[in-house]
Amino acid sequence: MDEEIQNKLNKYCIINRKYHLLDEKQFLSMFSNIKIEHLKKAWEYSFVEIQNKEIITSYVELQKNRKKEFSNRLRKFNFNSSDLYFYLNSEFDVKELLFDDEHFERRIRNALAKRHQIIIKTEIKKLKRQEKLREIKDKIISTIAITFIPILIFALLFVSRIRDGFTSVDILTERIYEREIYEFDGSICRDGKISHSQGRGTCSWHNGVYRKFHKGQHKKSKKESRIEAQERSWIE
């Protein structure tokens, strides 16, 4: 976004210098909501791009018989900032024009330059609004993340515990009993280690086999499941 704003400021300053519209103080005041470094960069850039001999001024009033022609000519222009910029920044060779035509062309260009500046200023304001909205959006997303992500993590970590807490002991007993099932054949070692083996040498490094189990077998008895349910349930 900064690059796009800088590009438009550069164009604004080039046309401003070429048609001698605003001094630096007026320019800085007009864009007081833009970072000063961007404004200074654009102002200096225009002095590099536009030399003194390229400046086009217009101080002579149009003759009455050419004012209608002036208005008609303006209406024919496509008031698109890119098209205007291309035209206004094109070469202006007075040697090819008669005296009246030269001043007519100067007046046309001057009027279009002012129109161009209004359009560019509007486009910059739009970009600044978009930038502001993006900052607000990012701030909202950041706030939501800071506020709700810890809550979400807490909920994910403790959802099972909370659900069990609001379940009656009888229902929770059945739930614990049914969900605690072995998914493979194996053995429980005397030190508590679970082994997928049941053959010779099983649990040899874990003080031997405590008991064997089979796939589909419940890990806990109904009595053990009820004791756990009584500890987890908040209802009874």
Image (spheres, rainbow, N blue to C red):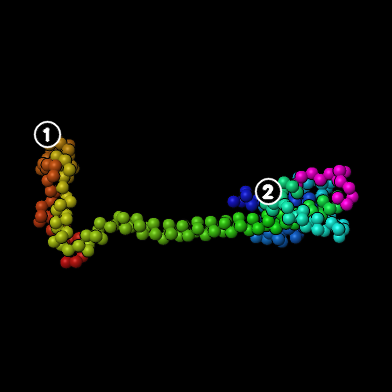
Q: Residue 223's quadrant in the figure?
A: bottom left
Q: Amino acid at mark 1?
A: Gly
Q: Residue furthest bottom?
A: 236
Expressed as whole percent of the image width and height from the top left, the position of residue 96 reads 86, 43
Q: Is residue 53 above or below residue 60?
A: above
- Residue, x 43% and y 59% (percent of image)? 144
Residue 127 location, x and y as percent?
Answer: 60, 55
Under tag 1, what secondary structure? loop
Comparing 134 with 61, the one in front is 61
Few, some or many residues within 10 Å of mark 2 (<14, 14–19, 20+): few
Q: Is residue 39 found left or right of 101 in the rendered image?
A: left
Residue at disc 2, secondary structure: helix
* Bounds of the magenta segment: 89-101
Hey, what amino acid is under mark 2? Ser
Q: Return the residue at label 1.
A: 199
Residue 82 numbered mark, or none = 2
> What is the x, y in percent for residue 193?
18, 42
Q: Nearer the viewer, residue 148 or 52?
A: 52
